[in-house]
Image: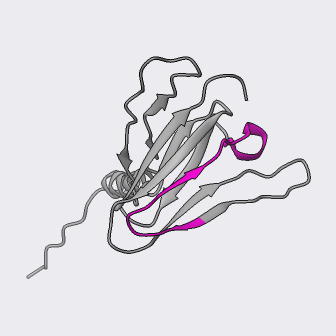
Amino acid sequence: MKKETHSLPRWTLGAIAGALIFLFAVTAFADRQTLTKSTAPGKYASTGVCVTQTEADTSNKDQFLSTGNDLVLAHNTGGSDHTVTITSVADSYGRTGNISQLVTAGNIYAFGPFPQTAWMQTGGYIYLEADSTDVDFSVITLPGTP
């Protein structure tokens, strides 16, 4: 008696392989979380402004649209120290100067402003990240020109 064998058509195997590659690519290159910015009210304001805090995205990392006059606050809401990194770009001499700061438990650290020539990534964003979701980021655009 002849043994029956079943095989999938070649196009099916190709489609499955293509779908797996696509799923890997989408997962590997997920979009960074874009932070909501607040704008400082200025010198003669009669009221303050509510500052938005956003929990750090430890998987996809974070970004904000650069004006060249932005201040970043990193609030460590946890009980242990965590590291915040802000990624620079190469200057005209190819030098970089990333910020890697240990943010101690319960404290708020301020960074910036960030000149676009040293910090703005392709697409107009500043890249930042934290090693824990215990870190909340706030971005405040300062009034005036950088």
Can residue 20 be seen in this snapshot? yes
Image x and y of residue 88, in percent: 70, 53
Residue toward you, 100 or 106: 106
Q: In the shown orientation, is residue 39 left or right of residue 86? A: left
Please determine whether, in this image, residue 106 is positioned above or below residue 108: below
View extreme (bottom): residue? 1
View extreme (right): residue? 93
Image x and y of residue 108, in percent: 46, 56
Q: In the shown orientation, is residue 35 left or right of residue 127? A: left
Please determine whether, in this image, residue 106 is positioned above or below residue 73: below
Residue 145 part of the magenta segment: no
Image x and y of residue 29, in percent: 48, 52
Magenta-colored span: 101-121
Residue toward you, 53 or 62: 53
Q: Residue at x 13, y 79 (%)?
A: 3
Which image quadrant: the N terminus? bottom left
Q: Residue at x 61, y 24 (%)?
A: 143
Which image quadrant: the C terminus? top right
